[in-house]
């Protein structure tokens, strides 16, 4: 796990500016840093290293291939690099490797098989900048699911790229304005979906894509080497036909193989244990594969409504892990909250960022790598919202659309609209199918979200352009929508930034290519056949942990953010950020709407997630020097 940065055709001091970019991501790689400059001076690659495999200098980056043709700056891990190395040696494409790093194997695979074929062989997480010195072409590559971040764009006429958006702000001549077009999306979802970023002319490379930038480095093309949509479609067209027990057998086999690869490191490895199905499954399988005691980590809340640490402790005891827990309070939150915006590089409003940061900080005191259970909800139908869509659509579909649409218009044009429940139902009536219904949910349930920004863009994104009925089964359509946007742009962003802020590498076994592709072959009856989500995943877990221990209401990784914000210290911080004159001076937000949302929270106890989204945006403006 590392950080990368670089540019092409930069007009200023190349050495100084590359160093500034690298220092901006020092937390991603505190163990070392290197630079590469092409002979003609037009291309620069920078790297910050968190040493995981081959801790010697032979694993340092940027690295040049044996022949000297390719140079690479790379963030991530290739879990099957030994398998690829054996193939290269067996085919006599390589006489020997200088070290034991996956970076060296990756370089030689690119040279031997070509960029697209080589990356197709890789199972792992990665963001790669590759320079072909022979053809004078830059390639940017991102992993299939979006575990590792990769930003790119234009700053002062130069092509730039980096692991985090904040790297660009330190460059000489940086003047890219805030991208006002995406603010409605941010205040609706709490994150900025790819390919957009908070800055104009800066984008996120989408998962499963390769960007090719040939000399003279002023135009580029992007193509997909792997598609989540096509993996889902293929899986659903080739459904698993075995029994429920056989499905659990195969899932357990694939997960064990994934976890075995992801436990490999030359540094200590542990795992997050939240007491939920996903992380408990990962930890259970880790312990079954590991000869010693797995190190597991959890945090608990002083507020019992949010505390699952007691269950995590019991699961750890049953599995025999070496368990560490940390109880957090409002005081801990007050310490970290004002620092959060600077850790993301752009506005990000998922409040579970707070416990994720704190558990990562604790975990880093013991290990350098931690496995995580993310992905289970989206791949195995775990979210309650999926059941809500089923329930609502089950009622709506009985009424033909030709009747629902006029009825919706009638209610929205009448005094009934003043009652929120009627407006919500009327707007839902406009949905043509379950996917459209799911896409409407955020804006229907939070109508003020679209009024916060003074600018209103029309950016297309997954929830607005998803093809209704792309998959035959309704739940799979909305799970796919989440895997295309919510998972890579919220969940994985949160885990990556909060872990890397503490120089901790995280790995996600459930997102292994083979696990993921198998999950898409499962019929919905094996995911939520009896009304309980993640059925086949539970079947695997119950081979290691008693079912009775896991059957309890799901709390998730949430925090009492509303309670904390009501406390004097944080309330003062918040009210200073949204002071009306300040908002008017900045010119981004409608101060009247912001005050309404804040007063609804403070005076009427009405909590909207937009309270937190606004505060994180305002704090980001301060960090970016625009506040």
Image (spheres, rainbow, N blue to C red):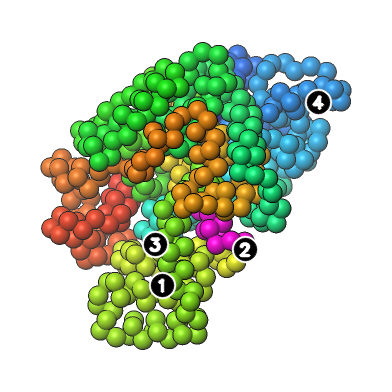
Whether tag 4 and tag 2 are in contact, CB under 8 A, the answer is: no
Q: Is residue 295 left or right of residue 623?
A: right
Q: Distance between the residues labelled 1 and 2?
A: 21 Å
Element type at mark 3:
helix
Q: What stretch is highlighted in magenta?
A: 471-483
In primary-sequence order, the first of circles 4 and 1 is 4
Would you say residue 407 is visible in this rendering? yes
Whether tag 1 and tag 2 are in contact, CB under 8 A, the answer is: no
Residue that mark 3 sits on? 442
For the stretch drawn in magenta, the main secondary structure is helix
In primary-sequence order, the first of circles 4 and 2 is 4
In primary-sequence order, the first of circles 1 and 3 is 1
Element type at mark 1:
helix
Residue that mark 4 sits on? 88
Q: Which residue is drawn at 68% across and 52% down?
A: 239
Which of the 4 image quarters holds residue 554?
Answer: top left
The picture places residue 534, in percent across and down from the top left corner, at: 50, 45
Residue that mark 1 sits on? 428
The picture places residue 594, in percent across and down from the top left corner, at: 24, 61
Q: How far apart are marks 4 and 2 (CA)?
A: 42 Å
Would you say residue 51 is visible in this rendering? no
Whether tag 1 and tag 3 are in contact, CB under 8 A, the answer is: no
The picture places residue 525, in percent across and down from the top left corner, at: 57, 52
Q: Is residue 324 above or below residue 518?
A: above
Q: Residues within 10 Å of mark 1 (few under 14, many from 20)?
A: many
Label annotation for residue 472: 2
Q: Distance between the residues labelled 3 and 4?
A: 49 Å
């Amino acid at each position: 796990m590392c950080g990368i940065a670089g540019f092409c055709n930069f007009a200023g001091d190349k050495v100084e500016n590359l160093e500034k970019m690298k220092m901006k991501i020092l937390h991603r790689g505190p163990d070392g840093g290197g630079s590469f400059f092409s002979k003609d001076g037009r291309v620069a690659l920078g790297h910050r290293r968190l040493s995981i495999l081959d801790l010697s200098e032979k694993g340092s980056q940027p690295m040049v291939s044996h022949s000297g043709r390719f140079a690479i700056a790379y963030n991530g891990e290739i879990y099957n690099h030994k398998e690829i190395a054996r193939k290269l040696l067996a085919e006599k494409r390589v006489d020997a490797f200088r070290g034991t790093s996956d970076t060296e194997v990756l370089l030689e695979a690119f040279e031997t098989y070509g960029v697209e074929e080589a990356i197709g062989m890789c199972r792992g997480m990665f963001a790669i900048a590759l320079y072909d010195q022979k053809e004078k072409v830059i390639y940017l590559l991102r992993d299939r699911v979006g575990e590792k971040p990769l930003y790119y764009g234009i700053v002062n006429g130069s092509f730039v790229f980096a692991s985090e958006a904040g790297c660009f702000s330190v460059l000489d001549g940086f003047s890219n304005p805030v991208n006002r077009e995406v603010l409605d999306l941010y205040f609706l979802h709490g994150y900025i979906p790819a390919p957009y970023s908070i800055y104009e002319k800066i984008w996120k490379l989408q998962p499963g894509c390769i960007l090719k930038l040939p000399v003279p480095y002023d135009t580029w093309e992007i193509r997909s080497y792997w598609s989540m949509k096509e993996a889902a479609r293929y899986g659903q067209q080739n459904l698993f036909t075995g029994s429920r027990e056989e499905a659990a057998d195969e899932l357990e086999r694939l997960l064990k193989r994934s976890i075995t690869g992801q436990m490999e490191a030359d540094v200590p490895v542990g795992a997050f244990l939240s007491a939920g199905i996903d992380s408990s499954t990962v930890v259970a399988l880790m312990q079954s594969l590991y000869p010693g005691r797995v190190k597991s980590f959890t945090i608990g809340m002083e507020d019992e409504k949010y505390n699952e640490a007691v269950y995590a402790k019991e699961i750890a005891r049953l599995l025999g892990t070496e368990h560490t827990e940390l109880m957090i309070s409002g005081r801990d939150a007050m310490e970290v909250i004002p620092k959060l915006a600077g850790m993301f590089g752009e506005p990000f409003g998922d409040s579970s960022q707070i416990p994720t940061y704190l558990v990562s900080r604790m975990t880093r005191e013991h290990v350098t790598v931690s496995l995580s259970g993310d992905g289970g909800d989206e791949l195995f139908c775990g979210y309650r919202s999926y059941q809500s869509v089923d329930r609502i659509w089950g009622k709506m579909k009985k009424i033909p659309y030709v009747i629902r649409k006029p009825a919706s218009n009638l209610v929205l044009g009448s005094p009934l609209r003043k009652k929120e429940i009627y407006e919500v139902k009327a707007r839902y009536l406009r949905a043509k199918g379950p996917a459209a219904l799911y896409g409407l949910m955020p804006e229907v349930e939070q109508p003020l979200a679209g009024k916060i920004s003074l600018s209103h863009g029309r950016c297309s994104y997954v929830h607005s352009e998803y093809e209704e009925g792309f998959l035959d089964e309704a739940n799979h359509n909305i799970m796919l929508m989440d895997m295309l946007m919510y998972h890579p742009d919220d969940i994985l962003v949160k885990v990556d930034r909060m872990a890397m802020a503490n120089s901790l590498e995280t790995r996600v076994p459930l997102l292994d290519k083979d696990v993921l592709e198998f999950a898409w072959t499962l019929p919905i009856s094996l995911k939520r056949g009896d009304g309980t989500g993640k059925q086949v995943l539970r079947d695997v877990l119950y081979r290691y942990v008693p079912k009775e221990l896991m059957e309890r209401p799901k709390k998730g990784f949430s925090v009492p953010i509303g309670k904390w914000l009501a406390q004097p210290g944080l309330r003062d911080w918040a009210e200073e950020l949204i002071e009306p004159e300040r908002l008017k001076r900045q010119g981004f937000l409608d101060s009247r709407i912001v005050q309404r949302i804040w007063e609804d929270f403070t005076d009427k106890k009405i909590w909207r997630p937009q309270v937190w989204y606004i505060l994180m945006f305002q704090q980001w403006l301060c960090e970016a020097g625009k506040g």
